[in-house]
Amino acid sequence: MPPDPVAIALPGTGTDLTEAIRAAIAAAHAQGGGVVTVPPGDWTSGGLRLLDGVRLHLSAGARLAAAPGWDRYAETAVDSIAEDSDRGFIIAIGARDIGITGHGLLVGDSRHWRVPGAGSLGTHLPVDRRPRMVVFEDCERVEIADIGIEDSPMWTVHLVGCRRAVVRNVEIRNDKRMPNTDGINLDGCADARIEGCFISAADDGICLKTTRRARLRPCERIVVTGCVIESESCALKIGTETWADIRDVVFADCVVAASNRAFGIFSRDGGVIERIRVSGVTVDCHQTPEGFWGCGEPVTITIARRHPGIEPGPVQDIVIDGLSGRAQGAVVLVGLPDRPVGPVTLANIDLRQVAGREDPVGHYDLRPTTTDLAPEPGQEGRRNAWVRGADGRIVGLVPYDGGMPALYALHVDDLGLAQIRLRRPTLLPPGWNRAAMVLRHVTTTPDLAPDSRS
């Protein structure tokens, strides 16, 4: 039997539904569960908390906007902290059988959460504290389906320590100059599925991570399929927060369009990253202004030290089988001398490399680094992405030795190569490496097909 509906007592005047929705959620919970439906129209609300068995349903034509003002979210504080934010617009903590469904919209209205007129390096300058749109912590049997979310001020959907969660047919459209507006973040979740979503954001599209919380949990048994993503950072990402293990992950049949980086793994914080499979992904990667991370890479896998005394975890058993499209950057695999990446298999890769305008000779990007943890006062852009060294250069951006190739591997153990096609301009742009592949301190198991060429 579907849960019973619970009506919202609409206010006699105005459009603020905060108290009406809170009362309806409490009533639905009291009866053992129910659906709270937001009717068509333009509405606003402060923070909302879902309880066991309650689903918030957004009717077609309903636009529920997050009210401006940090204090409006004092009652929806959460344990997880992201970018100095411990609050969310719609939250749930330890709840079961909850969801947000329907064909309406959640609206973040990010203009209220940035410094007017400020901004540099291609990004806006956000205020110090911004709420996330949806934060569910330690919940089980979660469904977010068919809704739209637009103009989030910060991370859009953040699921933390959740089990058996499904995010299906959700459309996210954020301001592509607003920092930290990740689309969907799965943080220490298990047995979760993301399917059929469209995401357009300035920051990561779909990101799996394990942030540092009191109850560290692995992120495991995750499937991402049939999604279309536009990202100024990394469309399909693992890390950089990797305090616990991330394993048994599938990214399949996705389209990465008009993005900076397509697929990335970033090991920084000690957790093991293993048994990752990528297949059937098409990419279109372009370089972005320097205020964003990356340089147009279709694939980037890096291991780097960030916290003093904390060794980054290994990255192993990674298979990328079936990736095609074009990119202005290179495939980048960079480990450490004492902690190489691998084993990694690249198979059935068909990429066309084209010149970019932002950085024609290219670089690879090791940010975030130890320096990013404590930037000097007055640093521009995102404080964890734009720190200049004594030489005036951005810390973490490394020029390719000999110019940009199409595939750059440094400190990789057991790199398997099969059916690799890397197409480059007939006349290489100035500063590019003449070699399509640069492999340094790499052990390989090549099996290049006869028609593979560069």
Image (tube, rainbow, N blue to C red):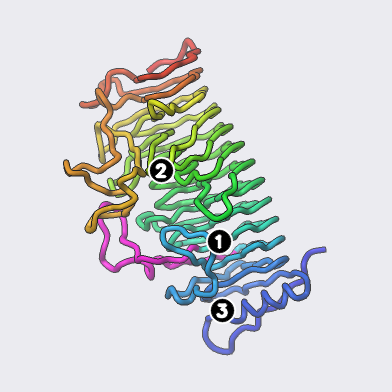
Q: Which residue is mark 1?
A: 135
* Mark 3 residue type: Thr
Q: Residue at x 49, y 41 (%)?
A: 238
Neighbourhood count class around disc 3 (C-alpha, 10 Å): few under 14, some 14–19, many 20 upward: some
- In three-dimensional space, the C-alpha distance between marks 2 and 3, rounded to whole angstroms, equals 37 Å
Q: Is residue 451 above or below residue 288?
A: above
**Can you tell which of label 2 and label 3 is closer to the viewer?**
3
**Can you tell which of label 1 and label 3 is closer to the viewer?**
1
Q: Which residues are magenta?
A: 104-132
Residue furthest right in the image = 1
| Side (left or right) of 364 relative to 302 | left
Q: Which residue is mark 2?
A: 259
The quadrant in which residue 103 appears is bottom right
Sequence-earlier tag: 1 or 3: 3
**Can you tell which of label 1 and label 2 is closer to the viewer?**
1
Q: Which residue is mark 3?
A: 18
Sequence-earlier tag: 2 or 3: 3
